[in-house]
Amino acid sequence: MSARRPGAVVVITGTSTDVGKTVATAALAAAARSRGAAVAVVKPAQTGVAPGEPGDLAQVRRLAGEITTVELIRYREPLAPETAARRSGDRVLTLAEITAAVERLRADHDLVLIEGAGGVLVRLAPDLTICEPARALGAPVLVVADPGLGSLNHTELTVRALRTAGCRPAGLVIGRWPDVPDLATACNRDDLPRLTGVPVLAALPDGCGAAEPAAFRAAAPHWWRPETGRLLGDRDSEAPPPPELSAPPIDPAETARNPQEIPT
């Protein structure tokens, strides 16, 4: 009997803090689970949460369902992990600790997601950002971005930083697509892939993180473009028709005429 093939690894980062990384992580986990994949999510560093309190991984589990989650370290103060560790005198993460945790998980999971902290260059430790584990593991990186004014600059800077670090930005995720996009938001939907050279793989409806878990899991697989399956090790690029809970894909140029529809 041949040895089990190690699972795929995908890193999820953002253009800044509070852009929807945790909900995007849950949505990708739910999409993978809908394909029958065994999914694990690693949060290397959680900040702003006291011991025993629910952190980001609790939200991922609530939305995505039965998945394995591993948090490596947490700090009480809501700061960058390196800053929080320095102020508290707690230990700092190492690259070896992150990669070892991921390698253990991918031995018996089809997909391991790594959710970063804040933006791409936020320090997890004095000489450690999310770029180092992405590069060490050869993992593609998804970038979660805001849809509105300022996103073009923030997203292009993030993509450039990843490429400079030797990482592969594989897709963009719009973290909070509004019901009624304004002019900047509608234009950004077209301009983001044009300026970064990275496709928009999903536009997550604003507020979807507050949805009932069953509704979230039913709709989440249809928020992702079919080519997202390649990140999950799935060669089949076809996706089933979206259910009633999810708006059908549209040409982004139609957004101004049909603002209630959400491009996927």
Image: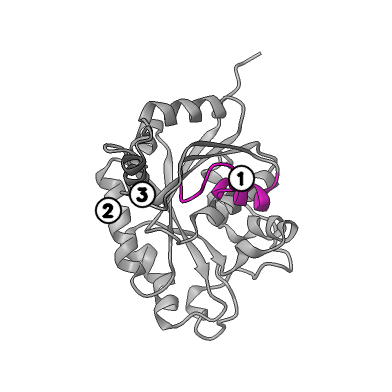
Q: Is residue 212 above or below residue 127?
A: below
Q: Decide: is 7 above or below 237.
A: above
- Is label 3 or label 2 in front? 3
According to the image, what is the colour scheme of the structure?
A: one colour
What residue occupies the far front of the structure in this picture?
A: 88
Residue at the spot 58% in from the left edge and 47% down from the top edge = 53
Relative to the observer, which residue lies in front, 239 or 150? 150
Q: Secondary structure at mark 2?
A: helix
Q: Which residue is mark 1?
A: 236
Crowding around mark 2 (Cα neighbors within 10 Å: few <14, some 14 to 19, many 20+) is some
Q: Nearer the viewer, residue 176 or 77?
A: 77
**Quadrant holding the C terminus:** bottom right
Residue matched to label 3: 80
> What stretch of residues is rendered in magenta?
47-65
Q: Position of residue 21 (x, y in %)?
A: 49, 55
Measured Cα–Cα span from mark 3 to mark 1: 39 Å
Which label belongs to residue 222? none
Q: Position of residue 72 (x, y in %)?
A: 48, 34
Q: Nearer the viewer, residue 59 or 130?
A: 59
From the viewer's perspective, tell me whether residue 134 is left or right of residue 252: left
Question: Under tag 1, what secondary structure?
Answer: loop
Provide residue 184's location: percent of width, then percent of height.
Answer: 39, 79
Q: Quadrant of the N terminus?
A: top right
Q: Quadrant of residue 192?
A: bottom left
Which of disc 1 and disc 2 is earlier in sequence?
2
Residue at 57% over, 83% down: 258
Q: Which mark is residue 160?
A: 2
Q: Kindly report the distance in space between the C-alpha atoms of the residues bearing marks 2 and 1.
A: 30 Å
Residue appearing at x 47%, y 78% in the figure? 253
